[in-house]
Image (cartoon, rainbow, N blue to C red):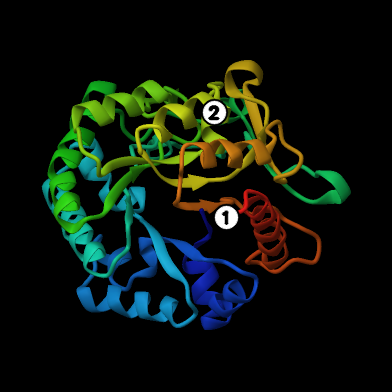
Amino acid sequence: MKLGVRVNRNTLDNRGDDYLRYLQQIGVDCIDIELGLVAGYNETGCFSREALHSLVARSAAFDLRIERANAINSQHLDALIGGPKAAQQRDHLCTMAELLGEVGVPVLGIQCYQAANAATGSGTGRSHPEGRGGYRYYHFDLAAEEAAQGAPRFTVSADQLWENLLLIYKQVIPVAESANIKVAMHGNDPPLYELYGNPQIMCRFADFDRLFSEVPSAHNTMTFCVGTRYESGEDIFDGIRHFGGQGKIAHVHFRNVRGTLPANGSYSEVFLDEGDMHMQRVVEALHAVHYQGAIDFDHVMQITGDTANGHQYVAYSVGYVRALLQGLGN
């Protein structure tokens, strides 16, 4: 297994190559990027071969391979809801899959529809309480969040979402096969079938099973987000055995959580060592199914005296995960 860190425009644009050098120094193997880092993507929803090569070369100068490149939901929203630019956005995803294959980026993240795209309101159910010693962590309370919301900007049905997602996958997966890359679905965050007056469709293991059966391919895979899978109330170890045994896990988000939505109506994203899960056992379960991809500790906590980019928390998490991996003897 490899140790990964998420990188976006805030971290890289603000610090430049110093941030990549920092990641190299603390022992990071690879990075998980938002495609907004590639010049042109935020403006057009796509990018040129030259822009992608430039970012890959910049990362490689610090021995950092781009392990996963994640499409931003808003850049293919019409494809997800059947809007006027749907066909163009599907074509863009195909083009990017082909280009990522050219430069050896092994995983393209294509996300499902998130109800937050249609939300209105103040989001008062999302807060940052204090944890041990006063650090700040992310907390989501469903009742408070829903109470603050107004009518959604638009509505769409679950059937429409499935139809549009399958259109995307039936077009992109053959390109991914030719390019020898994998397409990884993350699923909904939070994993709720209804939120902000709109449905969401990728919330449980059964939804991933449906996606894989509707578009059968070894290149149709998932980002196994330990946090969201736990928040859903399902057994993450069953999920790792089920999907890992099929070779369907292409990337892992390694987040620890307290509470689940079915039991508590809320959850908190906390330090890796103080959530409900024993993260060593999670690593051991991944090892047991021969997972060889990247582990990315996902979201950053707010630590006293830290930088805006979370250098202290990143270093803490990298050291924590590296120790777990070394304990496996690989």
Q: Residue 106 falls in which quadrant of the image?
A: bottom left
Amino acid residing under circle 2: Ile
Q: Assess disc 1: are there few (<14), some (14-19) or many (≥20) residues with their C-alpha within 10 Å of its C-alpha.
A: few
Foreground disc of the pair 2, 1:
1
Q: Secondary structure at mark 2?
A: helix
Tell me the residue at 29%/77% (across/down).
53
How many angstroms separate mark 2 from mark 1 (CA)?
A: 23 Å
* Residue on which the image places disc 1: 330
Amino acid residing under circle 1: Asn
Earlier-in-chain disc, 2 versus 1: 2
Residue 252 is left or right of residue 265, and the answer is left
Rendered position, 137 above or below 94: above
Q: Position of residue 296 (x, y in %)?
A: 54, 53
Rendered position, 103 above or below 92: below
Between 74 and 91, the residue placed more toward the observer is 91
Rendered position, 168 above or below 68: above
> Residue 236 — which label?
2
Residue 134 is left or right of residue 301, and the answer is right
Whether residue 139 is visible to the viewer of this picture, yes or no, is no
Q: Residue 142 falls in which quadrant of the image?
A: top right
